[in-house]
């Protein structure tokens, strides 16, 4: 992650505060590792292109090992607790395939709504554009026509996209 942030700092020629550069650097790292690729921050120099390429090759591997395995472990613990609760619950009749599908669809729509609210309030986008950006982010399509531009929006995007892609 540090390599990606350093690549961003070397690439950034703007005169913004160090905190803004750090937020933008983390944003660049998350957008790269989640493969959303909004296209709003791209490497310009030969050095930053080489560093970004190395970061992608190393970062995907490290990200997968460190974060995904940790998330798998925590989610498995949560799943085990939920299964135990469902087995002992008076609502265990709801523990079937149809209910699981409804719950999954509910989670997906909940994440889309949370992302849309974030884009709407933090980026002052229209309702349609907010939902569009949320869906594009969750699906990692990233056409490059919309992205999070404010510092608060980029912090939100880093947390939102990483959490939604892990679940």
Image: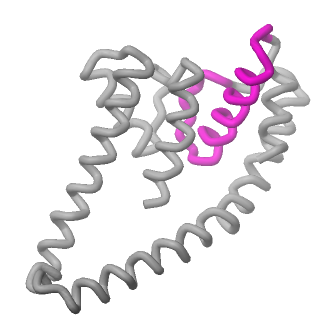
> Quarter holding the C terminus?
bottom left
Could you tell whether 83 is left or right of 30 in the image?
Answer: left
- Name which quarter of the figure residue 146 lies in: top left
Quick check: 112 above or below 43?
below
Judge by depth and name the residue closer to the eye, 73 or 81: 81
- The residue furthest right is 47
Q: Is residue 17 magenta?
A: yes
Query: Residue 41: x, y in percent?
Result: 66, 24
Judge by depth and name the residue closer to the eye, 46 or 69: 69
Residue at 84 percent of width and 43 percent of height: 3
Judge by depth and name the residue closer to the eye, 26 or 83: 83
Could you tell whether 122 is left or right of 82 in the image?
Answer: right
Quick check: 17 above or below 139?
above
Q: How is the image coloured?
A: one colour
Q: Is residue 12 magenta?
A: no
Query: Residue 101: x, y in percent?
Result: 19, 68
Query: Residue 23: x, y in percent?
Result: 68, 29
Could you tell whether 120 is left or right of 34 in the image?
Answer: left
Q: Report the magenta residues as a range.
A: 14-41
């Amino acid at each position: 992650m540090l390599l990606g942030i350093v690549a961003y700092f070397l690439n950034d020629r703007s005169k913004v505060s160090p905190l803004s550069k750090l937020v933008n650097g983390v944003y660049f790292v998350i957008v790269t590792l989640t493969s959303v690729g909004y296209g709003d921050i791209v490497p310009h120099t030969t050095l930053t292109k080489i560093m970004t390429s190395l970061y992608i090759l190393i970062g995907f591997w490290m990200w997968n090992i460190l974060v995904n395995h940790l998330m798998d472990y925590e989610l498995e613990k949560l799943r085990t607790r939920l299964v135990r609760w469902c087995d002992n619950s008076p609502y265990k009749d709801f523990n079937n395939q149809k209910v699981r599908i409804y719950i999954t669809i509910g989670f997906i729509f909940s994440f889309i709504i949370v992302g849309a609210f974030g884009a709407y309030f933090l980026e002052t986008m229209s309702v349609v554009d907010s939902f569009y950006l949320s869906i594009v982010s969750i699906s990692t399509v990233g056409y490059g026509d919309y992205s999070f531009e404010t510092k608060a929006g980029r912090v939100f995007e880093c947390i939102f996209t990483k959490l939604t892609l892990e679940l």
